[in-house]
Image (cartoon, helix red, strand yellow):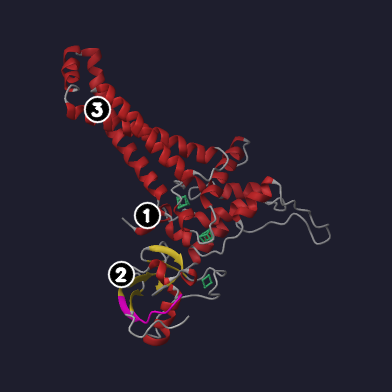
Amino acid sequence: MKSHRNHPLWFAFALHRASGLLLALFLPAHFWVLSYALNDAAALDGFLEWTDYTVVKIAEFGLVFLLAVHMFGGLRLMALEWLPWSPHQKTYAAGAVAASFCLSTLFFLSAV
Amino acid sequence: MTDLPPDTAPLRVSVWRGAKAGAFETFDVPMQESQTVLDLVAWIQQNADPTLAYRYACRVGMCGSCAMMVNGVPRWTCRTHVSKVMRGGTVQVAPLRNLPVIKDLAVDMDPFFDKWTEAGGAFFPTKSRADAVEPILPETPARQEADAAIECINCAVCYAACDVVSANPDYLGPAALNRAWSLVNDVKDGALDARLTAVSGAGGCHNCHSQQGCVAHCPNELNPTASIAGLKRATVRAALRGKS
Ligand code: SF4
Ligand code: SF4
Ligand code: FES
């Protein structure tokens, strides 16, 4: 990584970009599976059985983390741009990651 | 500066030579106490290779002409102590990022200053010398915004740190937009609408990704990201009023 990027808010930017791209890749697959609910319930049940596997549960944990971190990070950026300036951007970015981690861990614990 | 004990190993300083095409050349420079990166470059030019090109003027952090990439980070070299940036007895010095290299460590600052003009960086007076001097109250919110943005020394450190400038050569960049924001908040200025139009075009403030590389590296601790966020709000308000 280039040294001029070595600061916390660049990492926040990279996380927001990476989570956005991964969600953009995942969401079409997600809706495709959901579409089975309309026209092939048996196939949907087949997919849902997958969610019993631990590795799939860990993947779901990752997915919830991506969703949460993209949402909280996005809220931070919207506040930065639309509300009066706050000097605590690093704290907010760290808070967004921490809140996303808590949320996805709660989700994981309720899933296992 | 005082000399360190004579057995102190010299610093290995690699310096960019050439223009866009070129290579790093390494020099051994004697270490001294409280040495700055600019001192290293000056020592090389005075003692090892007089053809080394670089730029500086004040040496005290006022003129903004000595900025270079030091170990990949944009810095004002006259106020950067070697002890702070040295890595295992070596320092790498390169020309500022995002600007065309003229020779060695000297970059062409024209694109940087052209963008100040493009962003409406010139003050438009509303009064003549016949008018009374307008009282400016320091505690008003607009004046405080202007004051926070005004101490820029035009060093282009923020410009070199900005990834949006590298990705979009038309982007006006943090310093020019910061300047525009200080004038937007100047009650004596009479070109508000034209300036808001200038900063909301294709290369304007809405390109900024708010990564705050500019804030992290500005040697004067200015906050161009906050200024740009202010411009984003002001330009949207103007658009809603049908002004830009
Ligand atoms: S906050 Fe905006 S202007 Fe500053 S470095 Fe990032 S993209 Fe560039
Ligand atoms: S805003 Fe800071 S880094 Fe940018 S030109 Fe001005 S003083 Fe230099
Ligand atoms: S030489 Fe003037 S700011 Fe460094």
Label 3 vs label 1: CA separation?
34 Å
Give left or right: position of B61 versus B83. right
Q: Position of residue B39 (x, y in %)?
A: 45, 78
Q: Is residue B120 visible?
A: no
Give left or right: position of B127 versus B205. right
Of callouts 3 and 1, the N-terminal one: 1
Asked whether mark 1 and ligand 1 are closer than 8 Å, the reply comes as no
Marker count (numbered): 3
Q: Which residue is mark 1?
A: A6
Q: Position of residue B180 (x, y in %)?
A: 59, 53
Range covered by the magenta-colored residues: B25-34
Q: Amino acid at mark 2?
A: Gly
On the same chain, marks 3 and 1? The answer is: yes
Secondary structure type for disc 1: loop
On the same chain, marks 3 and 2? The answer is: no
For the point 43% across and 36% down, which residue is it? A74
For the point 42% across and 47% down, which residue is it? A9
Q: Chain of mark 2?
A: B
Q: Which residue is mark 3?
A: A29
Question: In terms of image quadrants, where is residue B31?
Answer: bottom left
Label 1 vs label 2: CA separation?
19 Å
**Up-down relation of residue B56 to residue B175 (above or below):** below
Would residue A53 be counted in the magenta stretch?
A: no
Q: Which residue is mark 2?
A: B88
Give left or right: position of B118 versus B130. left
Asked whether mark 2 and ligand 3 are closer than 8 Å, the reply comes as no
**Up-down relation of residue B193 to residue B241 (above or below):** below
Q: Chain of mark 1?
A: A
Q: Amino acid at mark 3?
A: Ala
